[in-house]
Image: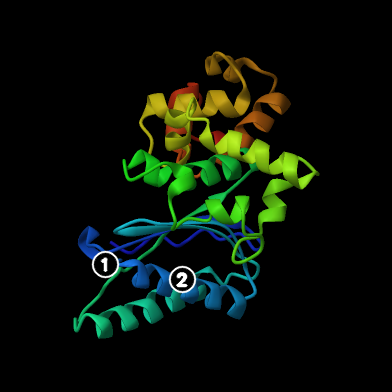
Amino acid sequence: MPREKRHLVNGGIYHIMIRGVNKQIIFNDDKDRHMFIRIMNYCKKKYDCKIYAYCLMKNHVHILFEDKEFMISDFMHDIAYIYAENFNKKYNRVGHLFQDRFKSIHVYNDDYLLRLIRYIHRNPEKAGICKTEEYKWSSYKEYIYKPNIIIERENILNKFHSNEKIAITKFKEFISDNSQEDLDRVYVKEKLKDDEAIQLIKNITKLEEISVIKNYKKEKRNEIIREILKINNINATQIARILGISKNFKNRM
């Protein structure tokens, strides 16, 4: 079966995840991690793109990336190729290091963006490695202590407050808040169960019961459905089933 074509938005922000083939370890020591970060920074400059967050785990990497001119595939190809070439040479190995296809999901609003930043930075803590603020191999410390090495921290911090010190304090509070961890996890899943999709739609629409949507007047109903359609991990068939509307609803909008 042919692969589904990537849905790219010019100037869009993407959550990228690259994983070791067969989930194998891709970082054996800190020198490997330093090497990956140097390569990522080199590719960022080469393609004049923006990175808002990253986290290096044992067998995968998260990157929050802004694609200016459909450069996401070239950017990730270069990172994977250069790193794998150096890794194989260092460890006298041959063959693929990464899975053939990296995961990329379009970030469709600020709520999703900030949840992703929290999810990415909290990965080591959720994995039981260490506290978020203690982990060396994510962009968290760059937000707090080291401005403008790789990430575009001002763009994100300004969403918390115009004053940098206040913004950093609010950023730290936001990242440490695990009260919505289950919902954050739903946002980043590739496919959702119906109950998870309902949870996400409720959060986006701010409705207690989403069954009322089908009873709204056409203009209001279509406006809400258009917002729901932006969600990457809920397809039209699932939306129709959950809302109790016709499967052909898109043709009637």
Position of the C terminus, as image quadrant, is top right
Rendered view: 102 above or below 211? below
Work out which residue is located at the far right of the displayed protein and give it.
Answer: 162
Residue 184 placed where, x, y %? 47, 35
- Residue 208 picture quarter: top right
- The amino acid type found where label 1 is placed reads Asn
Left or right, 82 with respect to 156, comes to left
Scheme by which the image is coloured: rainbow
Q: Nearer the viewer, residue 246 or 16?
A: 16
Residue 253 seen anywhere in this rendered image of the structure? no
Residue 44 placed where, x, y %? 58, 73
Residue 149 placed where, x, y %? 61, 66
Mark found first going from the N terminus, 2 or 1: 1
Check disc 1 and report the residue beneath it: 28
Check disc 2 and report the residue beneath it: 76
Q: Nearer the viewer, residue 168 or 154?
A: 168
Rendered view: 49 above or below 78? above
Instruction: Identify the residue at image location x=61%, y=77%.
Output: 45
Q: Nearer the viewer, residue 111 or 140?
A: 140
- The amino acid type found where label 2 is placed reads Met
